[in-house]
């Protein structure tokens, strides 16, 4: 009887301890800090994709406000390098980063974990018609703007390799996205390598010469939504809630019936023409490009980018991309919303993997 009493007492104390710990953690979580690169062409801050949809619709605020938690968004004009600095200073809990910036941060000791993937984004080469640039091979000896430290840099170097060139064969100028476009429009440089917003420059004076997917999906840019390990450890439930929202948004974007509605939302916020969002995400690529899963394509291409960054001297030591991600959260979100069969797994070439 005495043993049963102490056993029941122990169980009761354990329950009280667990409940107390959960209550303490809930009280401690007051702010969730999210850092993203500002990709806007106008005055409003902007980030695309599922995270941008969450920002525009105030979905995270609506989810966490009843719990007394504030969502703090930080948009960085300095893109990846500035976000890494904020992560190093413990000013962020989550961040959206392109592959190179995320790789540099991780290699330098930032305790980030990849939670959701973003894949297959094209980079473009825009050139003035007076430059005579008609192909990537024509960049030799030219003045080309690239935003160093961002995912654009790796994509640019991969593109150059396909035609036997490197950055040493031209004058590469480090300019952010808006400065690069302005310099090209003013004819101060010959070409710019960058993202979707370059498509808006097409016209009488500027051509779009090439895009990264011309040489295969492996040469496109990968990115992701990252969390600090500390936040995951302390608030796994909050982490799951955020991932759940982003996965639902990805599913909405992946449905071709929603192309007009979500692209209109993105265009209004970013001041980038709606047609460019539709061009960047064609119907036949919707399922592949919107997949949030940490599959062989994402891990394999991140691994290749890590090796490339090491070979180019951008990081000192490589690391295992497959150990970087924590797919528990995205897979749980898929199960919760009955989406486990919505996105297949893709191999390193971007092809659907055969089922066992």
Image: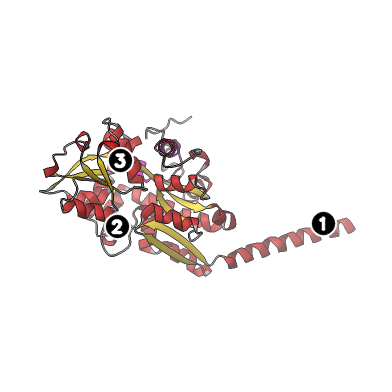
Find residue 256 and report its horizontal and vertical position in percent: 30, 47
Badge 2: residue crowd in 10 Å (few <14, some 14–19, many ≥20):
many
- Answer whether residue 128 is visible to the viewer in this image: yes
Q: Which of disc 2 and disc 1 is earlier in sequence?
A: 1
Residue at 23% in and 49% down: 198
Tag nearer the camera, 3 or 2: 3
| Residue 21 magenta-highlighted | no
Residue 43 placement: quadrant: bottom left
Q: Position of residue 236 (x, y in %)?
A: 56, 55
Q: Quadrant of residue 134?
A: top left
Front position in the image: 10 or 114 = 114
Vertical relation: 320 (above or below) 43: above
How many neighbours does mark 1 have within 10 angstroms: few (below 14), some (14-19), or many (20 or more)?
few
Q: Position of residue 27 (x, y in %)?
A: 59, 68
Tell me if mark 3 has few (under 14), some (14-19) or many (20+) residues whose alpha carbon lies within 10 angstroms of its own. Answer: many
Question: How far apart are the alpha carbons under marks 3 and 2?
Answer: 26 Å
Q: Give, as a single range, the part of the protein colored magenta.
A: 287-306
In this figure, which residue is indicated by the disc labeled 3? 156
Circle on res. 91: none
Single out the mark in the foreground, 1 or 3: 3
User: Closest to the observer: 12 or 279?
Assistant: 279
In the rendered view of the protein, which quadrant contains the N terminus?
Answer: bottom right
228 relative to 39 in the view: left or right: right
Instruction: Name the magenta segment's main secondary structure.
Output: helix
N-term-proximal mark, 3 vs 2: 3
Residue nearest the viewer, comparing 82 with 334:
82
Using the numbered discs, state the Cα–Cα distance from disc 1 to disc 2 in whole angstroms.
58 Å
Residue 266 badge: 2
Residue at label 1?
Answer: 7
């Amino acid at each position: 009887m005495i043993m049963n009493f102490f056993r029941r007492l122990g169980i009761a104390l354990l329950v009280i301890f667990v409940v107390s710990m959960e209550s303490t953690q809930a009280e401690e979580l007051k702010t969730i800090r999210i850092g993203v690169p500002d990709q806007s062409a106008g005055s409003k801050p902007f980030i695309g994709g599922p995270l941008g949809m969450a920002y525009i619709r105030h979905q995270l605020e609506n989810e966490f406000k009843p719990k007394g938690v504030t969502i703090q968004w930080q948009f960085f004009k300095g893109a990846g390098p500035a976000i890494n600095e904020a992560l190093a200073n413990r000013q962020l809990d989550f961040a959206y980063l392109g592959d190179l910036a995320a790789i540099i941060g991780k290699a330098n000791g930032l305790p980030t974990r990849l939670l959701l993937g973003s894949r297959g984004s094209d980079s473009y080469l825009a050139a003035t018609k007076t430059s005579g640039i008609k192909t990537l091979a024509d960049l030799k000896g030219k003045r080309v703007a690239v935003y160093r430290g961002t995912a654009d840099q790796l994509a640019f170097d991969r593109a150059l390799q396909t035609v036997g060139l490197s950055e040493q064969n031209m004058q590469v100028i480090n300019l952010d996205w808006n400065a690069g476009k302005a310099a090209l429009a003013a004819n101060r440089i010959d070409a710019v390598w960058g993202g979707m917003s370059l498509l808006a420059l097409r016209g009488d004076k500027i051509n779009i010469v090439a895009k990264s997917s011309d040489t295969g999906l492996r040469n496109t840019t990968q990115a992701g939504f990252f969390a600090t390990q500390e936040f995951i450890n302390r608030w796994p439930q909050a982490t799951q809630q955020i991932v759940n929202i982003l996965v639902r948004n990805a599913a909405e974007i992946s449905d071709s019936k929603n192309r007009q509605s979500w692209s209109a939302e993105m265009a209004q916020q970013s001041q980038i023409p709606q047609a460019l969002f539709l061009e960047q995400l064609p119907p036949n690529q919707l399922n592949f490009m919107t997949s949030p899963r940490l599959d062989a394509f994402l891990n394999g291409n991140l691994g290749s980018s890590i090796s490339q960054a090491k070979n180019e001297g951008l990081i000192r030591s490589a690391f295992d991309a497959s150990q970087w991600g924590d797919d528990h959260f995205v897979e749980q979100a898929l199960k919760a919303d009955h989406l486990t069969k919505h996105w297949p797994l893709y191999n390193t070439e971007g092809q659907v993997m055969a089922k066992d």
